[in-house]
Image (spheres, rainbow, N blue to C red):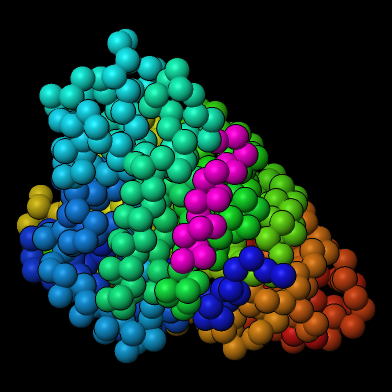
């Protein structure tokens, strides 16, 4: 028996699209994207074929971490519009067949949140992890208020961790409260109230920020999992058609805990992001010293390996069983885009052929559908630069709608843009690629359409890898074979079955299949039916 209701059936067919609201489209000319801008481009999303949009945090915030520092969960940030503008966007999206997910920053608030301002002056408050020991325990930040002691931050110092308790309480260290203490219970109720507020207003669920971080000192994340299991139980009753997707990076743990899906991410899980990075990471965008410098699989040198991803995928799906999903992003606002030097636009069709035919839920970071590149060397804007090598701004630049001076993003003078446009004079744009049937944009659209029209290629049918070197060869369901060559030289593989010699190509380039086997030119790919 499943502990939860099955995931809403729409999720299995979803193609997700991530919108960074400040960078997508600016309707009022102040240089910052907004809800009206998103609403004005819903036709692009519908044309592309995505049906579920995740908007990064759009709530009231001092914006020191680009909105991940929330000062009011129930009101939108004025720079994006009003609560009514968001409601209008959600309604218009619905008419385009698009669901909207918001970002739930569950683990911390801004120091400006009224909860925290009260806590900083009130020794009896337990909404945050507060220690009045002297000296402060390691990692704590000194109180900004009249209350002695200090608080535990969750990410930046200005993001105090909400108190969901410690898995191993200790009376000698009274800030380590049990998970069922009064403060943690109040915070769990608050999460429900926030979710209920927005779900009642028509949104279809949430991407939950740092979902694994809630209960502190939690070996195996057991108590954090119990917390989400409880919330999922409530959601199943109160909003059975809504979904929760976690930013956890460990689907084997997060989905059994209650999430309908989790992302493979640049971090998380046993190898701290190994599966996603082994596919995409060029080591030239957002990068960390501790990350494995080995070439990724989608590397033109053909020196990467697919085996690590395949094993992690198999392990995660086994742990999850039927009821949940793994989402596979092209990139995100914290991690290098697919087009990240030396990987260029010519290499992306093969990457998309894989991403859109693997049984994971595909998630496209805005702009990746036209091959917008990771722009190196940008200045820190609202907390985007974590270390010189971990610069997140490169994946947050304004969407390139057309080839005009403001790229159709904004009519403001360029110096007022949220982040600079990609300065490359040859930067891609939606308008130019729409006119070119051979463009990446058309390829991505065609692959999405093919996925939607072909149950074998979706999230519910089986996958079997026949060749995990170069080229990658795998079966989907009974009748489909996918062939992908991320390398810059011709690659060959045996036919998995002699009957495949007569397969018909549904989409692709550079692939020949015959009785002698499969041959794939540089960056070639194909989806075949047999
Ligand atoms: O990111 C969380 C995140 O990146 C961390 O969990 C980090 O990777 C981890 O410490 C391991 O390296 C989310 C948002 O996506 C990001 O934009 C925010 O800045 C962050 O949370 C804080 O809310
Ligand atoms: Ca604006």
Residue in the image at 87% along x and 66% along y: 494
Q: Is residue 38 above or below residue 72?
A: below
- Can residue 368 be spotted in the picture? no
Tell whether position 425 is magenta: no
Q: Is residue 354 above or below residue 280?
A: below
Quadrant including the C terminus = bottom right
Residue in the image at 39% along x and 52% along y: 188
Foreground: 461 or 197? 197
Magenta stretch in the rendered image: 218-234
Q: Is most of the magenta stretch helix, strand or loop? A: helix
Q: Position of residue 492 (x, y in %)?
A: 80, 62
Q: Position of residue 194 (x, y in %)?
A: 30, 61
Q: Position of residue 205 (x, y in %)?
A: 40, 69
Image quadrant where residue 433 sits: bottom left
Residue in the image at 43% along x and 79% along y: 51
Foreground: 74 or 313? 74
Image side of residue 55 versus residue 520, left or right: left
Tell whether position 232 is magenta: yes
Residue in the image at 75% along x and 69% along y: 463
């Amino acid at each position: 028996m499943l502990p939860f209701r099955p995931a809403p059936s729409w999720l299995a067919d979803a193609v997700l699209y991530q919108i960074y609201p400040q960078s997508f489209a600016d309707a009022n000319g102040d240089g910052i994207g907004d809800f009206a801008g998103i609403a004005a481009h819903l036709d692009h999303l519908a044309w592309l074929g995505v049906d579920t949009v995740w908007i990064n945090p759009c709530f009231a915030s001092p914006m020191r971490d680009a909105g991940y520092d929330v000062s009011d969960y129930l009101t939108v940030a004025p720079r994006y519009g009003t609560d009514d503008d968001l409601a209008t966007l959600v309604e218009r999206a619905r008419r385009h067949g698009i669901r909207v997910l918001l970002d739930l920053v569950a683990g911390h608030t801004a120091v400006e949140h009224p909860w925290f301002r009260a806590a900083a002056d009130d020794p009896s408050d337990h909404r945050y992890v507060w220690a009045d020991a002297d000296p402060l325990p390691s990692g704590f930040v000194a109180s900004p208020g009249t209350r002695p002691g200090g608080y535990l931050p969750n990410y930046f110092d200005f993001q105090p961790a909400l108190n969901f308790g410690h898995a191993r309480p200790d009376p000698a260290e009274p800030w380590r409260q049990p998970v069922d203490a009064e403060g943690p219970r109040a915070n769990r109720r608050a999460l429900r109230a926030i979710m209920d507020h927005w779900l009642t207003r028509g949104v279809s669920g949430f991407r939950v920020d740092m979902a694994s971080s809630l209960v502190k000192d939690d070996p195996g994340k057991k108590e954090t999992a119990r917390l989400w299991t409880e919330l999922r139980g409530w959601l199943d009753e109160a909003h059975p058609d809504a979904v929760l997707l976690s930013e956890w990076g460990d689907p084997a743990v997060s989905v059994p805990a209650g999430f309908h899906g989790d992302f493979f991410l640049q971090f998380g899980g046993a190898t701290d992001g190994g599966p996603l990075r082994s596919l995409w990471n060029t080591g030239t965008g957002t990068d960390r010293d501790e990350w494995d410098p080995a070439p990724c699989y989608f590397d033109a040198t053909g020196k990467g390996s697919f085996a690590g991803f395949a094993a992690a995928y198999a392990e995660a799906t086994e742990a999850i069983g039927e009821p949940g999903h793994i989402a596979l992003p092209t990139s995100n606002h914290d991690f290098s885009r697919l087009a990240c030097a030396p990987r260029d636009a010519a290499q992306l069709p093969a990457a998309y052929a894989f991403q859109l035919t693997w049984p994971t839920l595909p998630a496209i970071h805005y702009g990746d559908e036209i091959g917008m590149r990771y722009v190196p060397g940008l200045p820190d804007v609202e907390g985007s630069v974590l270390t010189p090598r971990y610069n997140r701004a490169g994946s947050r630049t304004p969407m390139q709608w057309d080839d005009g001076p403001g790229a159709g993003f904004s009519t403001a003078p360029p110096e007022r843009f949220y982040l600079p446009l990609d300065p490359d004079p040859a930067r891609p744009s939606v308008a130019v690629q729409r006119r070119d049937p051979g463009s990446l944009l058309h390829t991505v659209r065609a692959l999405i359409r093919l996925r939607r029209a072909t149950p074998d290629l979706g999230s519910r049918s089986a996958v079997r890898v026949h060749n995990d070197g170069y080229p990658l060869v795998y079966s989907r369901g009974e009748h489909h074979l996918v062939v992908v060559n991320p390398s810059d030289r011709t690659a060959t593989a045996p036919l998995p079955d002699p009957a495949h010699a007569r397969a018909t190509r549904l989409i692709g380039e550079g692939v020949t299949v015959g009785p002698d086997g499969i041959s794939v030119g540089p960056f070639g790919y194909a989806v075949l039916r047999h």
